Amino acid sequence: MSDRILVVIHDAFEMSTLVAALRLHEIDVIGEAKSENVAINLLRRLQPDVILLDMNIIGISAVKIAVSMRKVNPLIGIVILTSCPDFRLMGESNDEIPTGTKILVKKSIVDFTVLCDAIRESKIAAVEKHKVTWINGNTSFQDHGVAVLMAHLTNTQAEVLRLVADGMTNAQIGRTRYVSEKSVEQVISRVAQELHVQPDANMNMRVQLVGEYYRWLGAPHH
């Protein structure tokens, strides 16, 4: 018997195409939601086995929704779709992701069965409290290398990189994090070293870091 799936995606087009593809692969989609409130109500009413969440839900993160849903049903399987190889770049904590969660980087889903397998395995992973699993099996060598590089960043370094990308000056970041401007400069320098961003006489290092940030985030930046 197929697991019963609740899909939570904000974008209507992505919702319709993904749900259609899931059903073609004999995945039993029993409900669709575009917001946390609707998702929680459907969770209580329909009692799905697995929730499939998109990280780019407007107004609230998929991680927070997943945490809320686990409070309602501690054994529900969770699969999260994301464009970003590290949730810290989006201001989230990797430590808050519920146990057993399967996370798929969208561009790694070259073969749709990868997603279907993750959905089927997520229920067992939740019951047995497996570690969070990032599924990047079909990513290129370059993309895999990016994920490895990001894993080397400390939480402080990842947060400072995000604040730099938000356009904050070193002084502003220092006030936000209650540290000196000099400390911020040192963190930024260390981030550049970790990510192999080389000094370029024709381009400011902060500009280079912002460009890399948006590339890893999987979002366009102009």
Image (cartoon, rainbow, N blue to C red):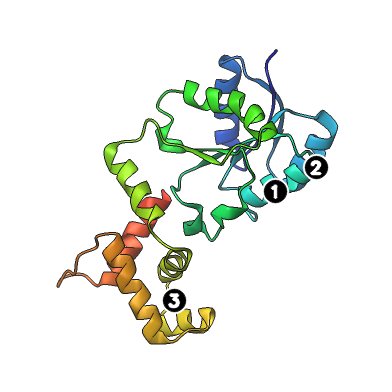
Name the one closer to the observer, 202 or 132: 132
Is 110 located above or below residue 65 in the figure?
A: above
Q: Residue at x 62, y 49 (%)?
A: 63
Q: Earlier in the sequence, mark 1 or mark 3?
A: 1
Residue type, mark 3 in image:
Met
For marks 2 and 1, the one nearer the N-term is 1
**Residue type of the residue flagged with mark 2:** Val
Q: How many other residues sit within 10 Å of disc 2, few (<14), some (14-19) or many (≥20)?
A: few
Residue at the spot 32% in from the left edge and 58% down from the top edge? 212
| Extreme residue in the right direction | 45
Q: In this figure, which residue is indicated by the disc labeled 1?
A: 67
Image location of residue 168, percent across then percent down: 44, 76
Residue that label 2 marks: 72
Question: Which element carries disc 3, helix, strand or loop?
Answer: loop
Mark 2 vs mark 3: which is more N-terminal?
2
For disc 3, the marked residue is 168
Q: Is residue 201 shown above or below 79? A: below
Residue in the image at 43% along x and 85% along y = 171
Q: Nearer the viewer, mark 1 or mark 3?
A: 1
**Cβ–Cβ below 8 Å for labels 2 and 3?**
no
Q: Nearer the viewer, residue 12 or 6?
A: 6
Where does residue 173 sit, x and y in percent of width and height? 46, 79
- Mark 1: amino acid: Val
